[in-house]
């Protein structure tokens, strides 16, 4: 078990040193320096959560909710800090998916 935990720590360190993680960290740090961009993302996530909740309830979101979300989405598309952050998040997510697939292959015995 100790060997397994050590390998898990090594994997964590390798992930931390990866280009994908470093880019996510860099863009997150840059984003945190811009309160307006942070608030924009927070507000967009809040509206998206509201819309998702309404849809999960079997209803359609209001025109106002959709318009607010679309307006904010347009602002986000024009903010380079937010664009960089979102792209880094996406790339890191894809990277972690590949890592998880490799782990699954190891568990399943596939080469």
Image (tube, helix red, strand yellow):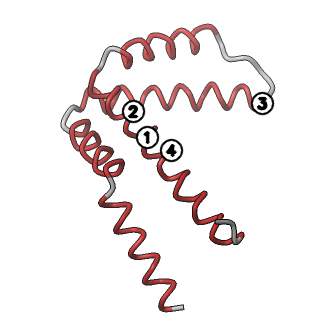
Helix, strand or loop at label 3? It is: loop
Is 42 rendered above or below residue 4? above
Helix, strand or loop at label 4? It is: helix
Helix, strand or loop at label 2? It is: helix
The residue located at (46%, 76%) in the rendering is 8
Q: CA distance from mark 1 to mark 3?
A: 32 Å
Q: Which residue is mark 2?
A: 87
Q: Earlier in the sequence, mark 1 or mark 3?
A: 3
Asked if the residue at tag 1 contacts the one at tag 2, i.e. Cβ–Cβ closer than 8 Å, the answer is yes
The residue located at (59%, 66%) in the rendering is 103
Asked if the residue at tag 1 contacts the one at tag 4, i.e. Cβ–Cβ closer than 8 Å, the answer is yes
Q: Which residue is mark 4?
A: 94
Residue 11: % across, % down: 42, 70
Asked if the residue at tag 4 contacts the one at tag 2, i.e. Cβ–Cβ closer than 8 Å, the answer is no
- Quadrant where the N terminus is found in the figure: bottom right
The residue located at (47%, 49%) in the rendering is 95
Q: CA distance from mark 2 to mark 4?
A: 11 Å
Q: Earlier in the sequence, mark 4 or mark 3?
A: 3
Instruction: Give left or right: position of 5 versus 49.
Output: left
Viewer-nearest residue: 32 or 107 = 107
Q: Which residue is mark 3?
A: 57
Crowding at mark 3 (Cα within 10 Å: few <14, some 14-19, many 20+):
few
Q: CA distance from mark 2 to mark 3?
A: 31 Å
């Amino acid at each position: 078990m100790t060997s397994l935990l050590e390998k898990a720590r090594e994997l964590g360190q390798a992930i931390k040193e990866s280009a994908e993680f470093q880019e996510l960290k860099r863009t997150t740090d840059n984003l945190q320096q811009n309160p307006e961009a942070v608030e924009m993302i927070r507000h967009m996530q809040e509206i998206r959560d509201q819309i998702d909740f309404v849809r999960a309830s079997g209803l359609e979101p209001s025109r106002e909710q959709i318009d607010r979300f679309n307006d904010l989405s347009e602002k986000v598309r024009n903010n380079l800090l937010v664009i960089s952050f979102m792209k880094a998040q996406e790339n890191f997510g894809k990277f972690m998916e590949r890592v998880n697939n490799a782990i699954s292959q190891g568990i399943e015995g596939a080469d």
